Image: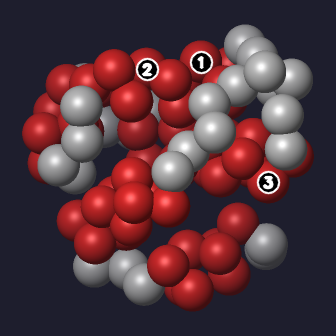
Amino acid sequence: MNNTNYLICDYIYKKWIQPFKSQRSFAIEHNIEESIVRKIKNTSLKNKEVGYNIPVNTLSKICEARNLKLSEFFKLINQ
């Protein structure tokens, strides 16, 4: 798997999903399926080599729900 996809999933899981009340509530509030949340989590925790290849559309939905531009998100993961 591309290291960039791992970095994206790892950031989203550790900074945004993990502190949330539940995976389901994160999915609902970010307009994505709960199965996507599980894929992001599994990539972060278990499978760095063959993890989830997050689509730009999904990443855009998550960022939009957080009032964050994609360019701002990429700046966050590069810190």
Residue 35 lies, with reference to residue 65, above or below; the image says: above
Task: Say the numbered circle drawn on residue 38.
Answer: 2
**Pointer 1 and pointer 3: residues touching (CB < 8 Å)?**
no
Give the distance between the C-alpha atoms of the residues marked 1 and 3, in whole angstroms: 15 Å
Q: Could you say which is closer to the camera, residue 64 or residue 53? A: 53
- Confirm whether residue 66 shows in the render: no
Amino acid at dot 3? Thr
Q: Residue at x 65, y 75 (%)?
A: 74
Residue on which disc 1 sits = 42
Q: Amino acid at mark 1?
A: Asn
- Camera-nearest residue between 33 and 13: 33
From mark 3 to mark 2, how far is it between C-alphas?
A: 18 Å
Classify the position of the C terminus by image quarter: bottom right
Name the residue that disc number 3 marks.
Answer: 4
Q: Residues within 10 Å of mark 3 (few under 14, many from 20)?
A: few
Of the numbered discs in the image, which one, if any, rests on residue 24?
none
The answer to which of marks 3 and 2 sits earlier in the sequence is 3
Tell me the CA gap for discs 2 and 1.
Answer: 6 Å
The reply to whether dot 2 and dot 1 touch (C-beta < 8 Å) is: yes
- In this orientation, which residue lies closer to the viewer: 21 or 61? 61
> Given the current orientation, which residue lies at the most extreme top position?
46
Secondary structure found at label 2: helix
The local secondary structure at tag 1 comes to: helix
Left or right of 63, for residue 30 = left
The image position of residue 70, as x and y in percent, is: 50, 79
The quadrant in which residue 69 appears is: bottom left
- Mark 3: secondary structure: helix
Circle 2 residues within 10 Å: few <14, some 14–19, many ≥20: some
